[in-house]
Image (cartoon, rainbow, N blue to C red):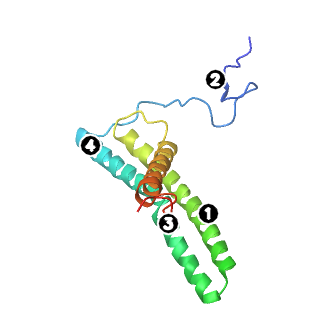
């Protein structure tokens, strides 16, 4: 009988991908004391807060900083197109760097959660990024529709 269960074969139906086998420990890992696990839990919470702030910075401070840099480039070079290019590629580059940092922080968070005694196998970076995107969308929608208005010339004075 073929063993083709995706959980058994690492998602493939022919053999197993290298490195996807179940973990087998020689013995149970040494658990830290209650105080050490508490410290690891607090550190995990701090790393999660930093990761969340990093993901939230993608939707506000980073684009604003790149728009300011692009305005300076546009002014000094007397070329608006160059300013637009700088803003576009700067925002894109900072987004990629931010996601790489958030991914590394997420690995640290998982290790700290495991050290704190939790069976943490998956990270939260995708959820945090999705929730921060929704928060940014709602905040922008509120600002655009309620505070500023889409068409101030049509609004009664």
Badge 3 or badge 2: first in the primary sequence: 2
Residue 101, given in percent of the width and then of the height, sits at 51, 58
Label 4, residues with CA under 10 Å away: few <14, some 14-19, many ≥20: some
Badge 3 or badge 4: first in the primary sequence: 4
Residue 113, given in percent of the width and then of the height, sits at 38, 41
- Which residue carries the number 2 mark? 8
Judge whether residue 107 can be spotted in this image: no
- Which residue carries the number 1 mark? 92
- Which residue carries the number 4 mark? 38
Badge 4 or badge 2: first in the primary sequence: 2
State yes or no: discs 1 and 3 in contact (Cβ < 8 Å): no
Identify the image quadrant of residue 54. Answer: bottom left
State yes or no: discs 3 and 2 in contact (Cβ < 8 Å): no
Badge 4 or badge 1: first in the primary sequence: 4
- The Cα–Cα distance between marks 2 and 1, rounded to whole angstroms, is 38 Å
Task: Give 15 or 134, whichever is nearer the viewer.
Answer: 134
Which of the two discs, 4 and 1, sits closer to the camera? 1
Task: Give 104 or 146, whichever is nearer the viewer.
Answer: 146
């Amino acid at each position: 009988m073929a063993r083709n269960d995706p959980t058994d074969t690492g998602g493939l139906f022919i053999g197993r991908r290298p490195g996807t086998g179940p973990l087998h420990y020689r013995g149970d890992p040494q658990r830290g004391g209650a105080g050490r696990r508490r410290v690891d839990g607090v550190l995990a919470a701090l790393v999660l807060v930093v990761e969340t702030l990093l993901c939230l910075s993608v939707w506000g401070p980073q684009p604003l900083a790149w728009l300011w840099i692009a305005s300076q480039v546009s002014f000094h070079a007397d070329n608006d197109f160059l300013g637009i290019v700088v803003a576009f590629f700067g925002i894109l580059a900072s987004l990629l760097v931010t996601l790489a940092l958030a991914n590394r922080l997420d690995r640290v968070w998982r290790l700290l959660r495991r050290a704190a005694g939790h069976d943490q196998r998956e990270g939260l970076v995708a959820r945090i990024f999705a929730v921060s995107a929704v928060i940014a969308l709602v905040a922008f929608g509120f600002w655009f529709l309620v505070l500023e208005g889409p068409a101030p010339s049509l609004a009664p004075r």
